[in-house]
Amino acid sequence: MSLAKVREIPIPVLSDVFQSRIKYTLNQALSKRRLARSNALEAEQSLLGFLGLANWTPPEPLAYTARASDVFASGRFDARFYAPRIQALLDLLAVDGRTIADVADPRRDKFRPDVCAAFDYIEISDIDGAGAATSTRLATEDAPSRATWHVRAGDIITSTVRPIRRLSAQITPDQEGFVCSSGFVVVAPRDIAPEVLLTYLRLPVICELLDLFASASMYPAITDAAIFNLPLPHVPDVVADQVTQSVIAAKAAKARAASMLEAAKRAVEVAIEAGEPAAMASLDQAEGAI
């Protein structure tokens, strides 16, 4: 749209009292969003502290070497793959000799378009920056070719494309049976809290490790094996509880922020359609239910 057309968009004239009420609701929503980010950061810091990475200073020599036999065995010729900081990180994470495969399983519950008329679809762009996913309701006849896997409550989905972007999310109970893109690996936690696994997979240093195994330049992606072979130390219950509670608090704050924002938007619509008294009543009712 041109700037001239934007300037022609009509705007309702609303009272100062009503505008102040909307402003208050929006500020409350923004406050909850900030709280959600703070809680998510607390979860990451708790896990980083246990892993010894909170104040970790990796070795960064100006030059380093790798044995030719290691290069040919790995099939990797890029210098970053052999950086001392990567080996030091792997040594920290592999202290128990455990991997994600020891605590979680791949879920390969294949989606069959012929058994339903419509479904809820999760694609890469539906993952937000806080470990949650939205979805789109689609008719089966409009199913994308990449609609592949059913997901279950508590599953963790993580993108195999450009893992450096930290695109992982936890499936909520109301998303039971939804369908996700083939661009995700569906991980079913077995001996680890889903919130802990989610936080671990979203740590920047872990995403950096996964990014090392991405191949191709235009559409860099990793394999399922690269994710399940990722080292994962045993997390003590006390740390796991801290991480879990922080993630749960972050989700609750984010959900409240979304509800408050939606209530404010709906109130403005009601004010335009039915007047400010009805809008105020709508906002009172919505805020009482939040």
Image (spheres, grey):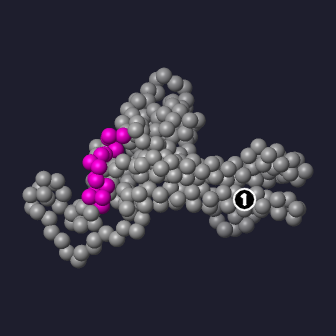
Whether residue 139 appears in magenta in the rendering, the answer is no
Residue 146 is at least partly visible in this image: no
Q: Secondary structure at mark 1?
A: helix
Q: Residue at x 81, y 49 (%)?
A: 283
Q: Is residue 172 above or below residue 215?
A: above
Q: Residue at x 37, y 51 (%)?
A: 161
Direction from residue 176 to residue 47 in the image, left or right: left
Residue 110 is at least partly visible in this image: yes
The answer to which image quadrant residue 47 occupies is bottom left
Q: Nearer the viewer, residue 86 or 261?
A: 86
* Badge 1: residue crowd in 10 Å (few <14, some 14–19, many ≥20): some
Q: Nearer the viewer, residue 154 or 179?
A: 154
Whether residue 98 appears in magenta in the rendering, the answer is yes
Q: Is residue 136 above or below residue 33?
A: above
Q: Residue at x 72, y 62 (%)?
A: 27
Residue 256's x, y, as percent?
Answer: 67, 50
Direction from residue 218 to residue 153 in the image, left or right: right
Q: Which residue is mark 1?
A: 28
Residue 215's x, y, as percent?
Answer: 27, 53
Q: Nearer the viewer, residue 138 or 120?
A: 120
- The amino acid on which the numbered mark 1 sits, given as a three-letter code, is Gln
Part of the protein shown in magenta: 89-103
Q: Residue at x 64, y 52 (%)?
A: 253
Q: Which residue is situated farthest in the bottom direction here?
A: 62
Q: Is residue 114 above or below residue 290?
A: above
Residue 222's x, y, as percent?
Answer: 31, 49
Q: Is residue 56 above or below residue 266?
A: below
